[in-house]
Image (spheres, rainbow, N blue to C red):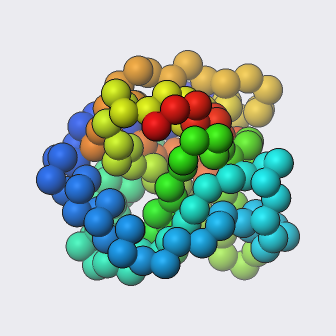
């Protein structure tokens, strides 16, 4: 994790598949995003809309990228379960402050997280993903390629990460 804190596949998903994923997410009921630890809304910590995708073709496609990143980054986590896919929409002024995607106190906990860039980066300003290094003190350098539409980013769920406030788009 220290040597390779995140792994990505730039523009791996075609525009057509991005459009299909967006359509699948938009047809589901969108709810205000909540904080997992409390199960409540906290608009000072997170703003956005979420829906849950159960589409097997999306799960299969993203699962293949997660497995490949796990192997190529030499994380070698034992992955024996998966969660529903969270489809998140960030509009103007939406964001998600620094957080981890796992709770190691649980009997089962998330080991790897995956993010897919579904929007054209020319259509919005802000909304950038930042990941902090293992000790959580400073942001890792983020390659500009991560903003490319169709890019798949995989990282260990215990790393602090955030999505900056969307300014426009």
Q: Residue at x 32, y 32 (%)?
A: 148
> In this view of the protein, which residue sits in the foreground, 58 or 68?
58
- Left or right of residue 98: residue 19: left
Q: Nearer the viewer, residue 92 or 111?
A: 92
Q: Quadrant of residue 57?
A: bottom left
User: How far across and down, in percent of the image, does residue 68 sit?
Assistant: 32, 51
Residue at (52% x, 72% y) in the render: 30
Q: Quadrant of the N terminus?
A: top right
The image shows residue 35 at horizontal and vertical percentages of 76, 63
Residue 105 location in percent, x, y?
A: 81, 69
Q: Is residue 93 visible?
A: yes
Q: Say whether residue 129 is visible.
A: no
Above or below, 110 relative to 18 = below
Left or right, 153 with reference to 106: left
Q: Is residue 160 left or right of residue 123?
A: right
Quarter assignment of residue 56: bottom left
Instruction: Give the residue displayed 76% in from the left and 33% down from the top.
Output: 136
Could you say where residue 2 lies in the image, as x and y percent from the top left?
61, 31
């Amino acid at each position: 994790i220290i040597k390779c804190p995140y792994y990505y596949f730039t523009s791996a998903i075609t525009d057509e598949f991005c459009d299909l994923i967006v359509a699948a997410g938009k047809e589901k009921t969108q709810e205000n995003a909540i904080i997992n630890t409390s199960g409540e809304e906290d608009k000072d910590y997170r703003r956005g809309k979420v829906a849950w995708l159960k589409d097997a073709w999306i799960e299969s496609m993203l699962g293949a990228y997660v497995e490949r990143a796990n192997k190529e980054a030499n994380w070698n986590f034992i992955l024996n379960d998966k969660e529903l896919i969270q489809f998140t929409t960030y509009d103007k002024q939406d964001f998600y402050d620094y957080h981890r995607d796992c709770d190691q106190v649980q009997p089962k906990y998330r080991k790897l997280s995956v993010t897919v860039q579904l929007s054209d980066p020319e259509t919005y300003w802000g909304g950038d993903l930042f990941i902090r290094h293992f000790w959580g003190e400073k942001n890792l350098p983020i390659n500009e390629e991560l903003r490319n539409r169709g890019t798949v980013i995989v990282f260990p769920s215990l790393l602090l990460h955030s999505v900056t406030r969307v300014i426009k788009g």
